[in-house]
Structure formats: C-alpha cells, structure tokens
Image (cartoon, rainbow, N blue to C red):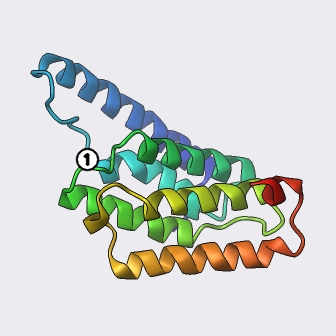
Amino acid sequence: RGVGTMGALDQFIELKALVLEAMEEHAAQPSGSSFPVDRLELLSPFLNVVVSSEVGGAATTAALRGVLKIIQAGALEAPTMSSQVALTEVIHAVKNCTFDSNDEVVVLSVIKVLVACAVCPSPALVSEASLRDVFETVFKTWRGFSIRSGALLRNE
C-alpha cells in the first residue's frame, strides 16, 4: 500500500474538510461530548504516508510527528473499539514504515511513536501481540542504527 505525493495531498485536503465540518458540529454540541471524527479516519492519511515507499524521509517524519501529536493530544485514550483499532493500525503502520535506514530523524520519530503507543493510558487498548511488535520494532530499529548512529540518537 503506497501513496504518492499527490495522493497524500488529496487525502490531507479531504481530512481537513472533514475535521472542519466536525469542529462546527462539535461546537454546537453540549460541552463534554466526544469529537465526532472516527480515529482511524483521522489517522489514515498519516499512516498511508508512513507506509509509502514513494515519499521521502521528510514527509515520513512529518507524518510520524502528526501521528505522535494525535496520540499525545489524547485522541486514542478513550477505551473504545475505535481507539483500539486505530492504535493497532498505528503500530502496524509504524512497524512497516519505509525509510532510508541512514535517516536518524525518521528512526527517532519511529521510536517516539511506538513508545507513545506502548505507554497509552488505557492498557486494554494495546494487545499483547501489539506490545510485542512495539518492543521488537524498537529493539530492531535501535540496534540496527545504534552502531552507526549520529549525535541525534546518542543524545535521546
């Protein structure tokens, strides 16, 4: 599954329209109501970039940072099936991230997203298999890069 630059741009434009519409709907709702955008729908354009072999390291890093911000904003904290599916998809996409193995900025972003998934506030959202994938991927990514790592990874 890959997405070219134009395909990714189209997906982000559609996502922007969806989020703006949802924000308008959400503003009209009583305080405390949940945000009406499906979590996987919110993450899909980012995850498509992450797994694409057709985009460069800068785009992959930007997509990973976007995913990290969504996780850190608490969008996947609710103990719902939607959050569990989205978190599993994030782990799967990041595990299958395509990037130049010499790009330590992407490596660091991969590790940060996976760690954020592993320490999510709702432990029931992350299956044992997904946690195993997180730890194996972090270990393999770090081990493969640590021998030739630059200052960025040594300082993190």
Is 64 positioned to the left or the right of 128 in the image?
right
Q: Residue at x 46, y 71 (%)?
A: 92
In x, y percent, where is residue 68? Answer: 51, 48
In x, y percent, where is residue 27? Answer: 20, 18
Circle 1 SS class: loop
Q: Residue at x 60, y 54 (%)?
A: 4
Q: Nearer the viewer, residue 70 or 11?
A: 70
Q: Residue furthest left?
A: 30
In x, y percent, where is residue 8? Answer: 54, 47
Q: Which quadrant of the view contains residue 23? A: top left
Name the residue beneath numbered marker 1. 38
Q: Nearer the viewer, residue 150 or 38?
A: 150
In x, y percent, where is residue 98? Answer: 65, 67
Q: Residue at x 54, y 76 (%)?
A: 135
The residue carrying pointer 1 sits among few (fewer than 14), some (14 to 19) or many (20 or more) residues within 10 Å by Cα, namely few
Is 116 positioned to the left or the right of 123 in the image?
right
Q: Is residue 76 above or below residue 111?
A: above
Is 31 positioned to the left or the right of 65 in the image?
left
Marks counted in the figure total: 1
Q: Which part of the image, by quadrant, shows the C terminus?
A: bottom right
Q: Nearer the viewer, residue 137 or 22?
A: 137
Identify residue type, mark 1.
Asp
Q: Which quadrant of the view contains residue 16? A: top left
Q: Is residue 93 above or below residue 132?
A: above
Q: Residue at x 28, y 65 (%)?
A: 125
Is 15 positioned to the left or the right of 62 in the image?
left
